[in-house]
Image (cartoon, coloured by chain):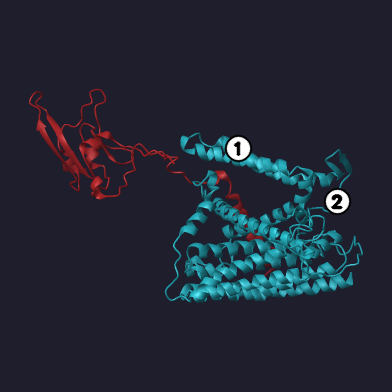
Chain colours: A red, B cyan
Amino acid sequence: MSLGPLLRKIFFVDLFKGMAVTFKAQHPDACMTEQYPLERPVIAERYRGLHRLNVDPDTGQSLCIACDLCALACPEKLISMTSERDPNTKKKVMLTYNLDLSRCMFCGLCEDACPTDCLELSQDYEYALYSRDGLVLDRERLEKGPEPTVYLR
Amino acid sequence: MLEYLRSYMSQPVTPGEAGNFLWATIYILLVVAGVSLAVLFMNWAERKALAHMQIRLGPMRVGPHGLLQPIADAVKLLTKEDIVPVGADKLVFYLAPVLVVITAWTVFLVVPFGPTYAVTDMNIGILFMLGVSSLGVLGIVMAGWASNSHYPLLGSLRSSAQMVSYEVAMGLAIVSAVMMTALDGHGLYGVAANHLETSGTLSMIGIVNSQAEQGTWFIFKFFPLGLIAFVVFAIAMIAETNRAPFDLPEAESELVAGFHTEYSGFRWSLFFLAEYSAMVAVSSIAVTLWLGGWLRPFASVHGPQITIPGYWQGGALDFAFSLLPALTFFLLAGFCFIGFVRMPKLPALRLQTLGLGAFGAVLALVALFLLVPAVRDRVQPIYWFVVKVSVFMYLYIWYRGTFPRYRFDQLMKVGWKVLLPIAIGVLVATAVLGVAL
C-alpha cells in the first residue's frame, strides 16, 4: 500500500467524509417526507383518478345524453346504463348508471369518448375500501364527486 | 428520621463508603430512574436523528415531533402477548433477559457523576465495571441457546465471539489509561509537569481526581498516545455493545433479529433496555477514563476574581461555566416555544400545541431552579458528565446512520490484527514515556 492511501486509512479520512454526508443530510430542508393526511400532494390537472359525472352547475341537470359511447369505449365493459326517452323534449335521459371499479385500469377512454364532457376522471385518489361491494359506483355516488377524507386526529 | 436523612449530607464521600444504606438506596433508585429515562429518551432521539440522516422525519404523530413515542412504545410492549417457544428451555429463557438487565444496571454502581455522586467508590472500580459488563455476554448466549432456534443461536455465537475478542483490545486500552494515573508529567511530554506525588488507582473517582490533579484529560496526555488509546477504546466499545457497524449479532438481513428473535413483549423490552443501558455504561467508562469525567473543560483555569453579592464569589470563568446548565435548559425551552409558535393552527393539533407549550414552560422552570446557588453548584459535575455521555450517544446514532456493517471475518481481523497490536503498542509506549519523563 502506498503512502497516501495508508495515511487516509490511518486517519479515517473516508469514514469522516461519510459522516459529513450523513450529518449534512440532517438539514430540515433536505427532508422529502410528506405528512400525508395533513399535507396533501398537488395533483396534476390531467391525473386520471376516480370517475365523476358532471352536472350542469346552473340547472342541476346531468350533462349526460345517454349516448352509451362511454360504455362502448370501455375495453373492460365496466359501464352499464339505462335510459328512457323523455316524452316532452324527445331527448334521451339517463336513468341509472353503474360503473364497476374493480377491474377499471383508469385508461381514460370513457372520458375521451364522452361528447358532452359529462364523464370525467377527477383528481380524487382516495378510493381504498374494505369490501368489494363499494367498488360498484352508482349514479348518485358518481355525481357527488370526490369526498376527500378530513384529518381529525 | 430527618436527622438520619441529613446524617450523610455533611460527609464528602459517596454513600457506599460512608456505609449509609438509606442514601445508597436513594442513589441507586435515582441512578436506575435516570438510566431508564435516558434509555427512553435515547429511543426517541435515535429514531429521530437516524430518520433525519436518512432524509426522513421519524416519529411525528404521537405528541409534538413524536416526543411521546417512547411512552407509546413502552405501553405497547408491556401489553403485548408474551410468547415462549414450545421447544424453549423455559428456565434459561426466563433468566436470560433478567441477567442481561442486571449486569447492565449493576455497573452503574461505580459510575461517578460527580466527586461524591456515585453509589459507591470501589478501589477496583474500573475492574468491577469491566467484569460485570462482560457477564452480559452470558445472558446473550443463554438467550440464544434457550430459544431453541437457528437464528438466535447463530446471533448469540457471533455475539460471544465478538465481545470476547474486543474485550482484549478494550482492556489493554483501559490499562494504558489506568497507568497514566500513576505517571507524572503533562500532556505535552512534561513541558509543564507538576511533579506530583502520584499513585495509580483503579477507582473511577480516583481516576478522574488524578486527571484533575495532573491538569489534563488523559486523551491529551502524552499526546498521541492517550488519543490512540481512546480511539481503540471507542471502536472496541461499539463492538462490545453490538451496535452498528459491528451489529452482526442482530444483523437483520441475515439473522432476523439475532439472539432476541424469539423474545416478545416485556422480555424483548428488557433486552432493549439492557442494550441501551450498556451503551450509556461504556460511554461513561470512556468519559471517566479519557475525557475527565465530571470535570468541565479548562477546569484549571478560573479567570479573574469577581464577586456578585449573595450569588457568586470566585473566578469569572467558573461563573460563566456554572450558568451553562441553566442556559441549556433555557435553550431547550426556547426550542419548545418556537415549536409552540410555529405549529400549524389546526384544531386537530390544539392539544399537541398546548402540551408542547407546557413542556417548554416546565423546562424553563427547571432552568430557573438550576440558577439557585445551592442547586447550581451541586448540579455542575452531573451536567458535564451527562453532556459528555450524550456526545457519545449521538456518535452511536451517527455511526449507525453512516457505516455499513462489517463482515464477520473483517470484524475479527479488525479486532485481533489491528486494534490489539495498537493497544499493546500504546501500552508499551505509555510505560516507556512515563518512566523516561
Residue extending furthest front?
B1
Residue B212 appearing in the image? yes
C-alpha distance separating marks 2 and 1: 36 Å
Q: Could you tell me the amino acid type at mark 2?
A: Val
Which image quadrant: the C terminus of chain B?
Answer: bottom right
Q: Which residue lies furthest to the left in this view?
A: A87
- Labels 2 and 1 touching (C-beta < 8 A): no
Mark 1 element type:
helix
Determine the secondary structure under disc 2: loop
Circles 2 and 1 on the same chain: yes
A99, above or below B152, in the image: above
Q: Name the residue beneath numbered marker 1.
A: B338
Pointer 2 residue? B301
Q: Which chain carries label 1?
A: B
Q: Where is residue A54 in the image (x, y as percent from the top left)?
A: 25, 32
- Up the image or down, A152 lies above or below B173; here it is above
Instruction: Give the number of the disc on residue A125.
Output: none
Using the image as rendered, state which of residue B361 and residue A45 is in the foreground: B361
Question: Which residue type carries mark 1?
Answer: Ile
Out of A145 and B5, give the one closest to the viewer.
B5
CA neighbours of label 1 inside 10 A, class few (<14), some (14 to 19), many (20+): some
| Count of numbered badges drawn on the protein | 2
Q: Residues within 10 Å of mark 2 (few under 14, many from 20)?
A: few
Residue B240 or residue A69, whichever sits in front = B240
